[in-house]
Image (cartoon, rainbow, N blue to C red):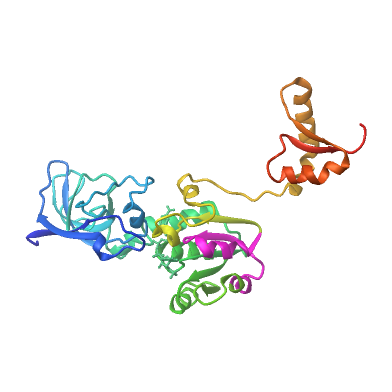
Amino acid sequence: MAERNQRITFARSPRGLPVPEDFGADETSIPSPADGQFLSRTIYLSLDPYYRNVMKNSQIYADRLHPGDVMVGETVAQIVESKHPQFAAGEYVAVRNGWQQYGLSSGQGVRKLDPASAPLGAALGVLGMPGLTGYAGTVYLGRPLPGQTFVVSACTGPVGTTAGQVARHMGARVVGIAGSAAKCEYAVKELGFAACVNYKDGDLTAALKQACPDGIDVYFDNVGGDTLTAVTRNLALGARIVLCGMIEAYSMDTPPPGPWLGPIVGARATMSGLVVYDHMNRMPEMVKLISGWIRDGQFRYREDVSEGLAKAPEAFCALMRGGNFGKALVRVGAE
Ligand code: NAP
């Protein structure tokens, strides 16, 4: 066992892309477990994009960092000393030790790992939090049907790798988006995707059109920004978009222009496209219900009536500036 505990600490919130100076380093003595705790030796530290948001103390995470705190993070570790009845020295665990060589744990949220059943590192990737993200987002939100086109960005990372391959197993035609030729080659040859588009290689909207001639039925979005825009130009009717991550904006100091969709993820909200003409068969149902409410005085409305056809242009221009108050009508003739 090493004599001291090396730690990487949080120094400051990054400006833009993180730089090494945003972190500090120190060493402490190796702590001893109290009753109900165990001490473990970190084997793997997971690096996850969300740490960038934790470093700006984003409200959606429970972690709060102050200068000098050890950086938070998931790890795979081996228990070296235990005073916890359910954990024994020698056992392997997935535990949040953070960026340090040794950590204490009360056992809360800790998963025991069997090194014989899967490589230990996978517990931080495809068999851990990122894998679950890709799996659950695909099976329960994206819900691709056999033969449908499923597109996933950051497709060679743990979330994208899992989402894409789960979709492939569900019978979808999977198209990846990645940031290099080598990543795209891997996506097709190793992950079994039907195609992969390198978004750094020219016009992404056109490339997606070519790779997805029938449109995109499901998009699993890991990056947001321009990539999301290009995908939205290629959607099939009834498409579903899973807003998972927006890494393109994590290092921006102010949200990008346009509606910032980050809170949609935090609120687990859904966005759906609505075209009224799809619901025309519900017209009799709606008229019956609301006209009844109007007759009973349970439903109110206003009309903003302009007199004479000649007023139509002016009234329309007012409408487009919010100048109407209620349904804008022009009385063209007597009732
Ligand atoms: P990852 O794919 O291993 O790494 C991030 C990748 O994002 C990069 O390798 C890069 O791949 C891509 N990327 C695209 N645009 C980028 C940009 N402007 N700057 C930097 N990277 C960019 O990461 P991961 O762990 O699998 O996570 C993928 C996404 O899922 C992240 O957005 C993460 O925050 C999100 N996530 C969400 C949840 C949730 O609960 N909603 C949970 C876990 C992860 P390319 O070169 O291929 O573009």
Res 224 seen here: yes
Q: Quadrant of ligand 1?
A: bottom left
Residue 224 lies in the magenta stretch = yes
Instruction: Tell me which corner region of the image, top left, top right, bottom left or bottom right, holds residue 214.
Output: bottom right
In the rendered image, residue 40, in percent from the top left (x then y), is placed at 17, 54
In the rendered image, residue 267, in percent from the top left (x then y), is placed at 48, 44
Frontmost residue, 93 versus 317: 317
* Rendered residue at 64%/51% (across/down): 273
Frontmost residue, 234 versus 253: 253
- Left or right placement of residue 165 versus residue 300 in this view: left
Instruction: Tell me which corner region of the image, top left, top right, bottom left or bottom right, holds residue 296.
Output: top right
* Rendered residue at 57%/62% (across/down): 229
Q: Quadrant of the C terminus?
A: top right
In the rendered image, residue 262, in percent from the top left (x then y), is placed at 47, 51
Q: Is residue 168 above or below residue 69?
A: below
- Left or right placement of residue 334 versus residue 178 in this view: right
Frontmost residue, 176 versus 162: 176
Frontmost residue, 107 versus 297: 297
Residue 308 lies in the magenta stretch = no
Instruction: Tell me which corner region of the image, top left, top right, bottom left or bottom right, holds residue 124.
Output: bottom left
Q: Which residues are magenta?
A: 208-236
* Rendered residue at 92%/36% (across/down): 333
